Amino acid sequence: MTGTRKVTVSTDVHGHTAGWAETPVAPPVTPTPDPAAAAFFDVDNTMMQGASIYWFARGLAARKYFTAGDLARFAWQQAKFRLLATEHAGDMSQAKEAALAFVQGWRVDDVERLAEEIFDELMAPRIWAGTRKLAERHLAAGQRVWLVSAAPVEIGRVIAARLGLTGAIGTVAEVVDGAYTGRLVGDLMHGPAKAEAVAQLAAVEGLDLSRCAAYSDSVNDLPMLSAVGRPVAVNPDPALLRQARDRGWDVRDFRTGRRAVKIAVPSTAAAGLLAGAVTAGLALHRRRHRPD
């Protein structure tokens, strides 16, 4: 069945109507579903410039949930963790505890509403156009596309929805009666946990991981990248770039100018720590500024 027919009127040299031509206009092409293949995209510095949770914190600071000083201390902590590579077991434990304090007592619908507002204000302009096109190619091929991030899954879901993607995998906080309890369900979605989550999703969805693709900027995501048939390093850090070259992986870099400079705070594998680093400031202001 053809779509709407485009009618064209042609005229002769004197301006008289010479005839009619009807040109069929093809209907929009619906991708043929490819249920066995999918793509998994890291968020921070892969899909977005900087860390999503940092931009979320910036948005909260603008709404007076905590102070600019708290935000500055938060940014410095993340830069220190990144530069000194201090992500060991103790740091991850600290990250988990901090993440718990960050969400305790907040209502899920309030966090999602704030995430939507802050995405539109601060995150949308920082989506890498090149990475988004990669995701859209998978969608056009009939494949599903998930974001995989250590940030809270509510933020990941908002980003995925805004970009028209399938969904998101992220750190999950326990919810009772619509409010966060301050306990996590499982561990932070970081490092090997990402690969495990992708494998579990593949089993549930019937995906063939050898036909799937994964994209990340960080060497911390080697487990996820190694789990799929098409790993791609996007805006890679030096360690991941070396690994990608050694393994013959595809590399895409959408950064311009001075490569070492990032528009946002550099992401760290402990994205739960990103959320929790503002806990002290949030605790001071939560009673007066908790979302209504």
Image: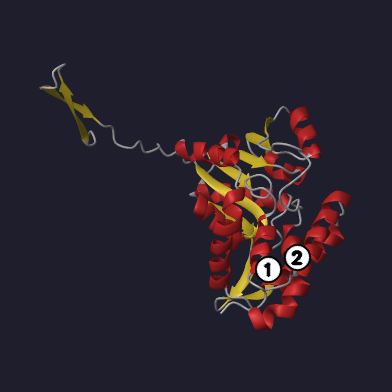
Residue 51 point in image, percent of width and height: 69, 54
Residue type indicated by callout 1: Ala
* Dot 2: element: helix
Secondary structure of the residue carrying tag 1 is helix
Q: Residue 264 versus residue 40: which sits nearer the camera?
A: 264
- Spatial CA distance of label 2 from label 1 is 7 Å
Residue beneath the point at 77% across and 69% down: 70
Determine the residue located farthest toward the front in the rendered image: 14
Q: Is residue 247 above or below residue 261?
A: above
The answer to whether the residue labelled 2 contacts the one labelled 1, judged by CB atoms less than 8 Å apart, is yes
Q: Is residue 208 visible?
A: no
Residue 255: horizontal and vertical position, in percent? 69, 38
User: Is residue 138 rendered to the left or right of residue 224?
Assistant: left
Q: Quadrant of the N terminus?
A: top left
Tag 2 residue: 71
Q: Farthest residue toward the bottom?
A: 287
Q: Position of residue 243 (x, y in %)?
A: 78, 34
- Which residue is disc 1 drawn over? 61
Residue at 74% in and 61% down? 274
Left-right relation of 175 to 98: left
Residue 182 vertical position relative to residue 248 in the rendered view, above or below: below
Question: Counting other residues with Cα less than 10 Å from the Cα at mark 1, is it few (<14), some (14-19), or many (20 or more)?
Answer: some
Does the image show residue 82?
yes
* Along the viewing direction, whichever of 275 and 250 lies nearer the viewer: 275
Question: Residue 239, percent across and down?
Answer: 81, 38
Name the residue: 78% across, 68% down: 69
Q: Look at label 2 and name its amino acid.
A: Leu
Residue at the image point whose x is 71% and y is 49% from the top: 263
